[in-house]
Each structure stands twice: as structure tokens, then as C-alpha cells.
Amino acid sequence: MQKQHDIVIIGAGIVGLSVASLLTELPLSIAIVESHEVPSWSPEAYSLRVSAISEASKKTLAKAGAWSAIAQKRISNYTDMRIWEQAIDASESLHFSCKDIGTENLGSIVENALIRAELQSSLANSDLHKANITWYCPDKLSALQIFESHAEIQLQSDINIKAKLVIAADGTNSVTRKIMHLPEVSRSYAQYGLVAQLQTQKSHQHTAYQRFYDKDVLGILPLANGDCSIVWSCSQVKAEKLLQLSDELLAQKVTEFSQGVLGDITISQSAKIFPLQLLHSRQYVSERVVLCGDAAHAVHPLAGQGLNLGLLDAAVLTEVLIDAWKANFDLGDLSLLRQYERKRKGNNVQMMTVLDSLFAVFQSTNPVLQQARRIGMGLLNQVKPVKNSLVEQALGLKKL
């Protein structure tokens, strides 16, 4: 069966749906190919996977028509962040506060399923949108051929689609990237992330916590119902052992590792684990194909920047495409797509380098380096201009 569209988006995750929503101001025929149904969101139960959304990402989601509905349903703004290794009240610990940079908060903790649900809702209720959206779901990309004037996409359902442009937002294991043989740099962090939801004895007070110790990183994120979400990055062996523990024993381990910063802990939603890896595609674009989000890059979750980088990709890519369409340019032209690559690749590489370096520093068992990093955190905490600059970069208020 032959179909024709202007743009085909492979992947209906947050980044792919954001791209689709941002492009609906144009009278385009847009196809979305997704292998799984978009997860539902329930107001009764929290979703396990959450993200820290920066101010820059909020603006992108607002432009996509989703942020207002997200904010009305369930978000948790956090005003402070505390980072430590030996003790949270030690001179070497770090404290970031929104008051220091004159903002209302440092970001918002939001369930990934809620973001996807509201982006999908925005697409479905697009009375003011000009684009025509067609879903191929569940379906998968099986082949991709590039011609001078178009791309041909073969789906597993035997549907063949002709399009001017293919946007790959199909995640770290991007089928599109592999079919196009785009070179990549990737390596495992030799760690897994364990996520769970907790009830805590003490109030989180809208504060995010992060402890580095003995090669592990524990992030504790505040939720709107008073609970907290955790991401515990550790070796695969340790993650699997933690996953096998009863909720009571796991809660005890989290309480111990966090040094009881929030008092006694109970597990309110059982844990899951997932592998962590570094990935960067050496090319974001080729003729009539462009990568964005995790299809182009993946980072360690220690600073919560993965999704924010992907949403910046979506914002920049759609700006380039909208300007090109208004100028009557071919949306799949390689020279056009390279504008997006130039605008995003450098910033992504800088952020990935910073995060990878931080990971390496906190993984070191060298006692001299361990002492140096503790002293460094203490010094950074005292130099407010530098510390505040780091916060502004993380929020997307300032470029690297």
C-alpha cells in the first residue's frame, strides 16, 4: 500500500511528539510511526519514570500546546538542590537555590507519561492547527531508501510511504540511524539506573537531593503528592541485587545511602532498572534524514539533562523547518538540515563532555582525586557567580 506525506516522524516519545506538535502550524501532511501505544496517564497513580524539566523545556512544551495542561494536572516545582558525598551538612557539600538566580524555581519534576499524554492530546485536539496528522501505530520501520526528490519508508505492515523528510526520534537504539549507517560513538557506563517511588518521614520541602559515594549516584526528586522519586545509578550486579530485595529491605538501603536525609523511607511503587550508556551520533543528518533526541545522543542521568537536550533539539529543528517552508525550500535538503546540526551538535557535545567528565571524577577511587573533588565542591559553593552560572546553563537560561 502506497502512502504519501510531507514528513514522517519515526518514534512517538516526548521528543517525536514535540516535533509533530511544533510543526502543526504549517499545512503539512505529517506521519507518526510508533511501535507501541503511547502510555496512558492516570491521575490516581504516579508513573515511575519522571524527568526534571528546565525553563527552556517548559517554553518548548508550551509552544507545543502541552505545558498548560501538564501544569494544571500534576507537577512538582523544586526550589533547591543539595549535592554531597560525605555529609549533607559538610563544608564540601553543594547547595543550589532559585533565590540565588532570581527565579521562582530550579525546574519541575513531571511524569514522562503525563508529558506524552498531553502532547498526544494537543495533536488530537488541533482545531487551530493546520497540519494533517496520520498515525501508523503500532508499526515499525523496516527499510528506508533515499532518492533525489524523496525518501521511501517501508513499514513492517507492508505500507510504503513517500516523504520529503524523515525525522528519527526513535531512541538510543534508533533503527533509522542503523539503517542509514550513521557513525556513532557509544559505550556503556557499566551502570544501571534503579527507579522507584518513596514515601518519606520528613517533607522534601521542594528540594532535590543527590549523593555521590563509592561510584554510586543517588538522586531523590520531590513529587507533588509529597512522595519522592529516586534514580540510583550503580553497577549492574548491584542494581540487580537491589531489585531482588523486598520493598522493606530496599527502603532500608535507600535510607542508609541517603544518610537519612528524609528520615525513614517506605517504598510506595516497586523498583525497575534500566541500562545507562553514552551515545553520540557523529552525524545528525544525511540527505532527507535527521536525528533528534536520544536517537542522536544519550547521557548519564546524573544531572537530569537528557530530555532537556532532546527538547532543545525539537525546538531548533522545527524552527529551521518552519523558516525553510516559509521560504519555499525543500524540507529534506541536506544543506538545510545541516543548519540544525550546526546549531545543536556543538552544544550537545559540550554538555555531554561536562557530564562525562563529572561521571569520571566521581567514579575515581584515587584518594587524592577524591579529596580534591570534595574541596572543589566546597569552593564552588562559596563562589556564587560561578555556581549561579552553572544553574542558569542547566535551566537553559544561558548557553554553555
Image: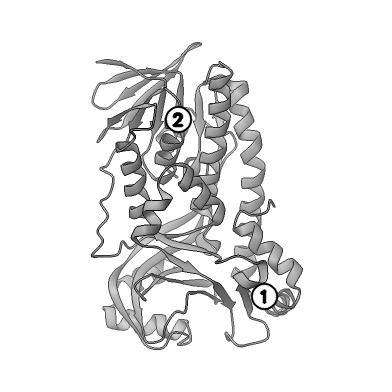
Q: Tell me the quadrant of the picture where the N terminus can be found.
A: top left
For disc 1, the neighbor class at 10 Å (few under 14, some 14 to 19, many from 20) is few
Q: Which residue lies furthest to the front in this view?
A: 128
Horizontal side of 161 relative to 309 (left or right) equals left
Kind of element beneath mark 1: loop
- Label 2 CA crowd tier, 10 Å (few <14, some 14–19, many 20+): some
Q: Can see residue 174?
A: no
Name which quarter of the figure residue 97 lies in.
Answer: bottom right
Q: In which quarter of the image is residue 28?
A: top left
Q: Is residue 263 above or below residue 22?
A: below
The residue at which mark 1 appears reads as: 366
Which label lies toward us, 2 or 1? 2
**In the figure, 17 relative to 3: above or below?**
below
x, y percent for residue 22 = 46, 36
Q: Which residue is drawn at the image coordinates 55% and 45% (left, top)?
A: 312
Which three-letter amino acid code belongs to the residue tagged 1? Answer: Asn
Q: Is residue 376 visible?
A: yes
Kindly give the residue lying farthest to the top in the view shown.
148
Residue 308 on image: x %, y % = 52, 52
Mark number displayed over residue 25: 2
Picture coordinates of residue 116 (x, y %)? 35, 48
- Please tell me whether mark 2 sits on a helix, a strand or a loop: helix
- The residue under the point 72% across, 79% down is 375
Q: What residue type is labelled 2?
A: Glu
How many numbered circles does the render carry? Answer: 2
In the image: residue 26, left or right of residue 141: right
